[in-house]
Amino acid sequence: METLVCVPGLMCTAGVFDALRAEVPGRSRVFDLPPIDDFRAIAARLADSLAEPSILCGMSMGAYLALAAASLAPERVAGLILIGGAAGADTPQAAQNRQKAVEWARRKGADALAAVQAQSMLAEANRGREDLRAKLLEMTRVTGLDVFAEHQTALAARPDQTAALSAISCPVLVMTGAEDAVNPPEAARAMAAALPHADFVDIQGCGHLPVLEAPAIVAAHVRQFIESKSREANYA
């Protein structure tokens, strides 16, 4: 069975995958995002870190990177699980908004940033959950505003990967929260439709962070994906 390599999102530590990894059997590890501002360089480091064929499970920024790594090293990516992702690049306005977010966070601080993330990334019914707000605050404080700035720069300049989707030959599971306001479900659905071997799942009652909002449901889909892939390999 291939190793499950989890790739975190913006301002997320390895702990964002703790609940998921606890419910998924087999080997797994987390790729720690390097604190640099070059998207292509981060994707190359991810691809280079794969010593053997692996299943990449990326969320948000991690999904963009996992998709890029699959193009860079297709022989080492046996499957993709893309959560809260999309294939397109930032619009010029979105890229400017990232810089504005960095400037705002520098003025207001990490705690204020975590509070805003809770409002913008969680489904409405989950915004009052103290466990989720505490987790976001912890990860934001640990990651820090310098890394936030570096990764926002990387994301603002990331390439449009739409044209590369048709060449992704491995099986893919695309998941999104039904209330995702960062990458709306229609963007994830379009990405899945353009991938040759992809299934699409929307998770009800979740926003941009289903890995935190509904880890048991996400884990069930991940297990099913891995088991289905294993069965296909046995029949090959």
Image (cartoon, rainbow, N blue to C red):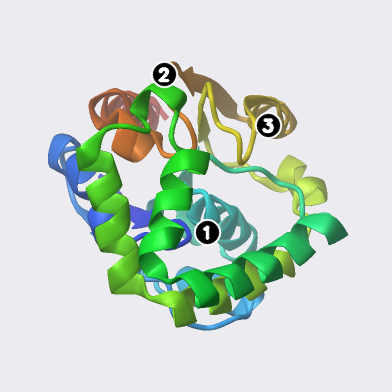
Is 59 placed above or below 149 here?
A: above
Horizontal placement of 137 versus 163: left or right?
Answer: left
Look at mark 3 in the image and give the residue it sits on.
Answer: 196
Residue depth check, mark 2 versus mark 3: number of the one nearer the observer: 2
SS class of the residue under badge 2?
Answer: loop
Which sits in the foreground, 76 or 20?
Answer: 20
Residue type, mark 1 in image: Glu
> How many numbered badges does the structure rendering display?
3
Question: Which residue is farthest top?
Answer: 204
The local crowd at label 1, few if under 14, some if 14 to 19, many if 20 or more residues have their Cα within 10 Å, is few
Task: Locate residue 235, reporting x and y percent.
Answer: 37, 24
Residue visible at 30% across and 39% down? 212
Residue depth check, mark 2 versus mark 1: number of the one nearer the observer: 2
Look at mark 2 in the image and give the residue it sits on.
Answer: 205
Residue type, mark 3 in image: Pro
Residue visible at 65% across and 74% down? 153
Task: Locate residue 215, reporting x and y percent.
Answer: 27, 32
Look at mark 1 in the image and give the residue it sits on.
Answer: 75
Q: CA distance from mark 2 to mark 1?
A: 36 Å
Question: Which residue is farthest right?
Answer: 92
Q: Quadrant of the C terminus?
A: top left
Residue visible at 45% across and 25% down? 124
Q: Is residue 57 visible?
A: no
Which sits in the foreground, 29 or 59?
Answer: 59
State yes or no: discs 1 and 3 in contact (Cβ < 8 Å): no
